[in-house]
């Protein structure tokens, strides 16, 4: 029953994204958002953090949290002992990286994993509870924010990197981002 509920919830999320439901955008410190979400949850795997503060994006915080949670759930299912999470400014973009130390994803399968209901053979052997929709949802959320979600090369494991356009810090945060 829980698996069915998860599939229905994921399908509803995708339907909203497909319908281009409006985002509730606000200037958000991505490092702080990620830190708060990591503090809120318990993990069976060690989480190593490198979270740059004052990396602002105009985003819907609930949707970006969903993107993060989907990547973390995926990483936790496949990691051996550790997940590294980082946030940094990377040129005109904010990069959020989730890297697990599992078996990784072959280069020829790096786009396929973003297709709806796709579960790679290796993940089916180990993975329980995944709907095959989490990575598709994460990519749709990144794209709805004018960003990207890609899998990049790494020496070990899978390295998921969503990038979102940087924005100016709101005046209530103090100094704005930009020309330093």
Image: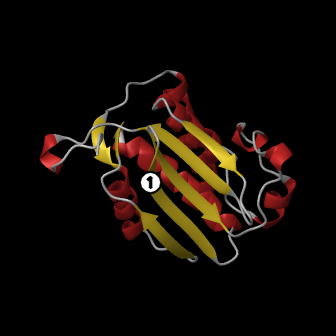
In the rendered image, residue 87, in percent from the top left (x then y), is placed at 45, 56
Please say if 118 is above or below 101.
Answer: above
In the rendered image, residue 140, in percent from the top left (x then y), is placed at 56, 34
Classify residue 56 by image quadrant. Answer: top left
In the rendered image, residue 127, in percent from the top left (x then y), is placed at 74, 63
In the current view of this chain or complex, which residue is farthest to the front? 180
Residue that mark 1 sits on: 88
Q: Is 19 or 2 nearer to us in this picture?
A: 19
In the rendered image, residue 92, in percent from the top left (x then y), is placed at 44, 37
The answer to whether residue 1 shows anywhere in this view is no
Display colour scheme: secondary structure
The answer to whether residue 79 shows anywhere in this view is yes
Position of the N terminus by quadrant: bottom right
Residue drawn 50% across the image and 47% down it: 67
Residue drawn 78% across the image and 55% down it: 105
Task: Please tell me how crowded label 1 is: few (under 14), some (14-19), or many (20+) other residues with Cα within 10 Å.
Answer: many
Please say if 174 is above or below 143.
Answer: below
Residue drawn 55% across the image and 24% down it: 18
Residue drawn 37% across the image and 30% down it: 23
**How many numbered discs, if any?**
1
Classify residue 122 by image quadrant. Answer: bottom right
Please say if 90 is above or below 79.
Answer: above
Where disc 1 sits, the SS reads strand
Q: Is residue 171 left or right of residue 120?
A: left
């Amino acid at each position: 029953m829980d698996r069915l509920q998860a599939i229905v919830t994921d399908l509803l999320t995708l339907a909203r994204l497909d319908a281009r439901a409006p985002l509730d955008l606000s200037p958000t410190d991505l490092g702080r958002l990620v830190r708060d979400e990591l503090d809120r949850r318990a993990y069976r795997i060690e989480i190593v953090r490198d979270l740059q503060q004052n990396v602002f994006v105009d985003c819907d915080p609930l949707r970006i949290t969903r993107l993060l949670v989907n990547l973390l759930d995926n990483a936790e299912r496949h990691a051996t002992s550790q997940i590294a999470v980082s946030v940094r400014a990377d040129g005109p973009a904010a990069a959020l990286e989730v890297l697990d130390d599992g078996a990784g994803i072959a280069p020829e399968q790096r786009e396929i994993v973003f297709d709806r209901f796709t579960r790679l053979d290796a993940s089916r052997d180990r993975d329980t509870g995944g709907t095959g929709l989490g990575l598709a949802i994460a990519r749709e959320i990144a794209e709805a924010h004018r960003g990207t979600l890609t899998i990049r090369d790494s020496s070990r494991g899978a390295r998921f990197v969503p990038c979102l356009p940087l924005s100016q810090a709101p005046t209530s945060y103090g100094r704005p981002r930009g020309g330093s």
